[in-house]
Image (cartoon, rainbow, N blue to C red):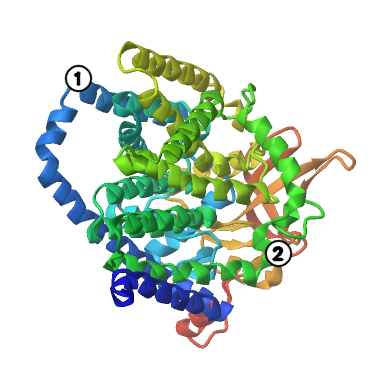
């Protein structure tokens, strides 16, 4: 009996061994070496993982189309199918029209932009902070591996590779992802609630101001929820048709999800449980290349976490006075109050959806009650559990883990303009719990369509009422400032201008096509900038400043952690007033305040001698 048992379950032993080996490889590598591995090999690693995902996806798509082409054609050419596809396109266009495509969260999104720039130009995973064009070639002299996972910037770099580099490609990537998300929401909604569920799902998300906002952003939030839906759909496919191909697809989709956001790895828990449930249902375990590759593919995530070990400032705990640990019981009370404020606010200053918060919560409770009743009655043995019910139920474990993580997190206040985006995944069970109730518990026919119509119209009305004025984003001056700089860079680039920009955070300028360096680099050695200015072949030098008005002195003072050396004389060429007490300027460096500008350098043995020294002294 024992040998037979071992033979049936040995793949789990192999997986456990690979998991332990991968964990040891991930945590035992020295932090500095691990970050070098991410910088130098991260692009090729994520390229390989995406390639494995495509290798797993294509045969299933081909098989599904071959086996079900006639049924799918017959199903989607019906009036309801055509209507759903038309609404999908209409909702997508409405989403694109509601918000300007721009950075919504700084500095996160420009950092992702910078990482994508490096992955496209250099095939390295790092944010460029100092870039010069040496003999016309963009050359990065200072870079840093960022803490954010690398799948999203990799996808942006692919768009660069396919269509040519443009800073706007980061927004194009999210436009594509938002359409894919809506399509997956339709498919999941139809699985859970039929055609009514598909249409309701469209309107729930298309009218949700927070999701619409980030569908037009440069961040990875839409990719995160898109891959959660993708993993759930792969799980449904595996539940319905368990074999090596569907197992590989489920595993690799979940691995990609883990490479989107820091906490996205939590959804490996429900994926693992779902796989075990299928194995026990079938009475045996089996392996696949995707299953065995997954633990090894997750090793670079452990390497990447060394960004936090190398520099604890990456937790950004300086934003809150007295915080010494990123997680703790002391944050729970304030977080719960902020969650209540966000989810149930009637104010136009909160980009929430009351339909999702109220009706969605009721729908989720009804779903849990119904699943509990099925469990007690053991109706699952009669085949009455649909794949959608099983997967939504199992994935609640991942959503619960996400909730607990945010609840104990020092930066978990959802009513904060910077933190709201972290609530996006938690709206998924609310939306699809409601979809399930409407599609499965309300009687089929007029009543179901009336409920679908009422919920859709109310959600759309409330959403448009908030998205129109967009007062929930007006107070975010930092975002307005960065987008103004990005617009200026695009304008100058279009005019063919060439400058060296000195800024506290020059990534936006580099992404916009300009040579740039940090104020910190100039402050370390001002003579290098003086040398640069003295050479007539170099482009003009501009310094970007953020200024705050001091009512005591009556002067505008430079804000930020870095300041430009005071000895240089400048003249303002661009100014943007953000508020009565905040503005930003771009100023041309015209010389020294108390001394004449030095003449062109001379006295070098040869032009080669000069250029060798010139490169070493770039500011």
Identify whether 2 is placed above or below 512: below
Examine the rendering and report whether any part of residue 218 can be seen: no
Task: Residue 593: name its quadrant.
Answer: bottom right
Which residue is at 59% across, 68% downward?
307
Measuring from the top left, give residue 399's x and y in whole percent.
52, 46
- Closer to the camera: disc 1 or disc 2? 1
Task: Residue 549: name its quadrant.
Answer: top right
Q: Dot 2: few (<14), some (14–19), or many (≥20) neighbours within 10 Å?
A: few
Q: Which mark is residue 79?
A: 1
Which residue is at 53% across, 40% downward?
426
Examine the rendering and report whether any part of residue 17 can be seen: yes
Q: Counting residues from the N terminus, which is met first, the one under dot 1 or under dot 2? A: 1
Which quadrant does the N terminus fall into?
A: bottom left
Q: Which mark is residue 596?
A: 2
Work out which residue is located at the far right of the displayed protein and give it: 552
Q: Nearer the viewer, residue 582 or 150?
A: 150
Task: Residue 576: name its quadrant.
Answer: top right
């Amino acid at each position: 009996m024992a040998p037979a048992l071992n033979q049936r379950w040995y793949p789990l032993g192999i997986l456990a061994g690979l998991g332990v080996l991968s964990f040891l490889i991930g945590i035992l590598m020295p932090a500095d070496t691990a970050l070098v591995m991410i910088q130098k090999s991260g692009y090729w690693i994520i390229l390989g993982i995406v390639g494995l995902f495509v290798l797993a996806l294509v045969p299933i798509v081909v098989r599904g189309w071959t086996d079900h082409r006639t049924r799918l054609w017959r199903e989607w050419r019906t009036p309801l199918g055509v209507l759903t596809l038309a609404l999908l396109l209409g909702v997508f266009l409405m989403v694109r029209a509601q918000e300007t495509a721009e950075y919504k969260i700084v500095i996160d999104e420009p950092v992702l932009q910078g990482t994508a720039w490096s992955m496209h130009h250099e095939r390295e995973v790092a944010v460029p902070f100092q870039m010069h064009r040496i003999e016309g070639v963009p050359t990065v002299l200072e870079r840093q591996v960022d803490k954010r996972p690398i799948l999203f910037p990799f996808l942006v770099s692919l768009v660069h590779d396919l269509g040519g580099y443009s800073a706007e490609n980061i927004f194009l990537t999210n436009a594509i992802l938002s359409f894919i998300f809506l399509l997956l929401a339709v498919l999941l909604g139809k699985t859970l609630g039929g055609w009514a569920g598909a249409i309701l799902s469209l309107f729930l998300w298309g009218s949700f101001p927070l999701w619409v906002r980030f569908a037009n952003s440069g961040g990875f939030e839409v990719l995160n929820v898109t891959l959660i839906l993708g993993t759930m759909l792969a799980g449904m496919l595996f539940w319905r048709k368990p074999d090596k191909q569907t197992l590989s697809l489920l595993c690799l989709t979940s691995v990609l999800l883990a490479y989107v956001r820091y906490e996205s790895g939590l959804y490996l828990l429900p994926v693992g449980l779902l796989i075990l449930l299928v194995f026990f249902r079938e009475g045996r375990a089996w392996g696949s290349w995707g299953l065995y590759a997954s633990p090894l593919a997750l090793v670079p995530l452990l390497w990447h976490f060394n960004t936090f070990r190398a520099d604890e400032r990456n937790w950004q705990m300086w934003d809150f006075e007295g915080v010494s640990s990123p997680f703790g019981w002391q944050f729970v009370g304030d977080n719960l109050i902020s969650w209540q404020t966000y989810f149930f606010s009637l104010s136009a200053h909160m980009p929430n959806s009351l339909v999702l918060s109220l009706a969605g919560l009721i729908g989720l409770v009804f779903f849990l009650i119904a699943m509990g009743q099925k469990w007690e009655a053991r109706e699952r043995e009669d085949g009455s559990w649909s794949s959608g019910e099983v997967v939504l139920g199992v994935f609640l474990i991942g959503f619960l883990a996400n909730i607990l993580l945010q609840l104990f997190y020092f930066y978990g206040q959802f009513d904060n303009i910077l933190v709201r985006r972290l609530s996006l995944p938690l709206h998924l069970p609310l939306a699809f719990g409601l979809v399930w109730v409407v599609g499965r518990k309300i009687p089929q026919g007029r009543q179901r369509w009336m409920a679908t119509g009422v919920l859709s119209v109310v959600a759309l009305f409330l959403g448009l009422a908030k998205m129109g004025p967009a007062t929930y984003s007006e107070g975010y001056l930092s975002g307005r400032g960065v987008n103004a700089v990005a617009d200026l860079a695009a304008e100058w680039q279009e005019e063919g201008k060439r400058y060296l920009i000195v800024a506290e955070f020059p990534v936006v300028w580099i992404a916009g096509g300009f040579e740039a360096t940090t104020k910190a680099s100039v402050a370390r050695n001002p003579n290098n900038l003086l040398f640069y200015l003295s050479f007539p072949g170099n482009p003009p030098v501009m310094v970007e400043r953020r200024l705050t008005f001091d009512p005591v002195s009556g002067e505008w003072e430079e804000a930020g952690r870095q300041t430009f050396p005071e000895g240089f004389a400048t003249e303002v060429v661009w100014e943007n007033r953000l508020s009565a007490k905040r503005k930003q300027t771009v100023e041309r460096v015209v010389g020294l305040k108390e001394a004449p500008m030095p003449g062109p350098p001379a006295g070098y043995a040869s032009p080669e001698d000069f250029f060798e020294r010139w490169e070493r002294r770039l500011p």
